[in-house]
């Protein structure tokens, strides 16, 4: 990164950096550019492509359908039922 690029970024982001801060930012990004050049120099021709570094595992349980109670057990305490349905008073006129 050069000073002109940093000046434009300052204007776009409405920043006001001191000279020492500017030197620090330029130094930081220059180091990152060197790191990138070093990474680009690595031979990855025989490396298998991957999306994630670690294998992805689903940590939720399997969705299995089961019924804990029968309809008759649930309706045993109901005041009134009719053909397997609960009977309740009408609440809307």
Image: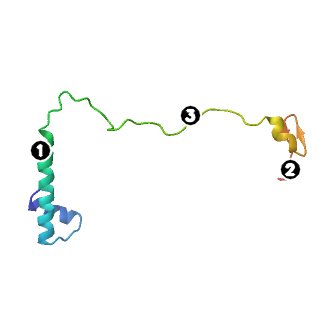
Rendered residue at 37%/35% (across/down): 55
Mark 3 crowd level (few <14, some 14–19, many ≥20, 10 Å Cα): few
49 left or right of 4 in image: right
The residue lying toward the viewer, choosing from 7 and 72, is 72
**Considering the numbered disc 1 on the image, is that residue within a helix, a strand or a loop?**
helix
Q: Which residue is mark 3?
A: 62
**Considering the numbered disc 3 on the image, is that residue within a helix, a strand or a loop?**
loop
Q: Earlier in the sequence, mark 3 or mark 1?
A: 1
The residue lying toward the viewer, choosing from 87 and 27, is 27
Rendered residue at 14%/33% (across/down): 43
Which of the 4 quarters of the picture holds residue 26? bottom left
Which of the 4 quarters of the picture holds residue 84? top right
Identify the disc placed on residue 37. Answer: 1
Q: CA distance from mark 3 to mark 1?
A: 46 Å
Q: CA distance from mark 1 to mark 2?
A: 76 Å
**Residue 40 location (% of width, % of height):** 14, 40
Q: Are marks 3 and 1 in contact (CB under 8 Å)?
A: no
Which of the 4 quarters of the picture holds residue 9? bottom left
57 left or right of 22 in image: right
**Residue 36 location (% of width, % of height):** 15, 46
The residue lying toward the viewer, choosing from 17 and 67, is 67
Q: Earlier in the sequence, mark 1 or mark 2?
A: 1
Q: Are marks 1 and 2 in contact (CB under 8 Å)?
A: no
**Considering the numbered disc 2 on the image, is that residue within a helix, a strand or a loop?**
loop
Mark 1 crowd level (few <14, some 14–19, many ≥20, 10 Å Cα): few
Q: CA distance from mark 2 to mark 3?
A: 40 Å
Q: Which residue is mark 2?
A: 90
Q: Which residue reaches farthest right?
A: 80
Rendered residue at 90%/46% (across/down): 79
Rendered residue at 58%/34% (across/down): 63
């Amino acid at each position: 990164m050069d000073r002109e690029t940093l000046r434009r970024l300052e204007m776009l982001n409405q920043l006001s950096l001191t000279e020492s801060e500017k030197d620090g930012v330029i130094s930081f990004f220059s180091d990152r550019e060197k790191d990138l050049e070093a990474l680009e120099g690595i031979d990855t021709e025989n490396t298998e492509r991957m999306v994630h570094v670690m294998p992805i595992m689903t940590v939720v349980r399997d969705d299995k359908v089961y019924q804990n109670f029968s309809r008759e057990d649930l309706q045993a305490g109901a005041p009134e039922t009719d053909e397997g349905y609960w009977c309740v008073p009408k609440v809307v006129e």
